[in-house]
Image (cartoon, grey):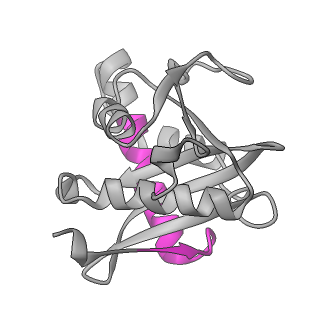
Amino acid sequence: MTDRWTITTADVTAPEATDLLREYYYDVANRYYRLHLGREGTPEELESGLAGSPSGDLAAPSGLFLLGRYDGAPQSCAGLRRHDATSVELTRVFVRPGLRGTGGGAQLLAAVDRAARTMGAERIVLDTRLDLVEARALYLRNGYREIPAYGDTGPYSEVWYGKDLTEPDCQGS
C-alpha cells in the first residue's frame, strides 16, 4: 500500500493544508481533553486553541510543510521549522486515523528527512505528549531517540526526540 502514498511540499495556507491542520489539532486536542478532563473539547475551545497555534512559520524562509496524498487525496502532513543553525523542529505530524498502518507515516518521515537536509539541517528535534503513543512508536521505528528537553517547554511537551541526519544509517532516508 505504500506505493499509493506520495509526499510533496505544499503551501501551508492552501485549503487542503488548513483542513488537515484543523483535523490534526482537533485530534490531539480532543485526546488531551478526554484524558485530562474526561470530555471532548467544545467547538469554541478547539477553534480558540487552533487560532492560538498558528502554522505560518511552516513556510519559507523559516520552514516548510509536507502534504501526503493517498490515491491522490490529502491524508497526512508534517511541518518543519528552523530551530537553530544546524537543526529543524518537526511538528504537526498527522496521518488520518483510517490510514494509519498503511506505511504513510514512514514515507512522511522519510520525506521529512530529505526536506530537512535541503534546509541544511544536520538534526531534527521534536516534542510530544506521552499519550500520543502511535506517534511516539512511529518516531522510534524511524530512527528518533529520546533526548533531553530543549527550548521552552509547555504543558503539552512531555517527551523529546531527536534524529541525527549525519549518521550513516540516516543517509539513505
Q: Quadrant of the C terminus?
A: bottom left
Q: Residue at x 41, y 59 (%)?
A: 108
Q: Residue at x 29, y 61 (%)?
A: 104
Q: Residue at x 52, y 76 (%)?
A: 15
Query: x%, y% of residue 160?
Result: 54, 24
Query: x%, y% of residue 87?
Result: 72, 42
Q: Quadrant of the N terminus?
A: bottom left
Query: x%, y% of residue 42?
Result: 41, 38
Name which quarter of the figure residue 163 lies in.
top right
Depth check: 9 or 23 in front? 9
Query: x%, y% of residue 145?
Result: 47, 27
Q: Residue at x 68, y 65 (%)?
A: 118
The magenta segment: 7-30
Depth check: 10 or 6 in front? 6
Q: Is residue 100 above or below residue 15?
A: above
Q: Is residue 23 magenta?
A: yes
- Can residue 86 be seen here? yes
Q: Is residue 18 above or below residue 38?
A: below
Q: State how many labels appear.
A: 0
Relative placement, left or right, of 49 versus 31 is: right
- Can residue 41 be seen here? no
Give the main secondary structure, helix, strand or loop, of the magenta stretch: helix
Depth check: 27 or 97 in front? 97
Q: Is residue 52 magenta?
A: no
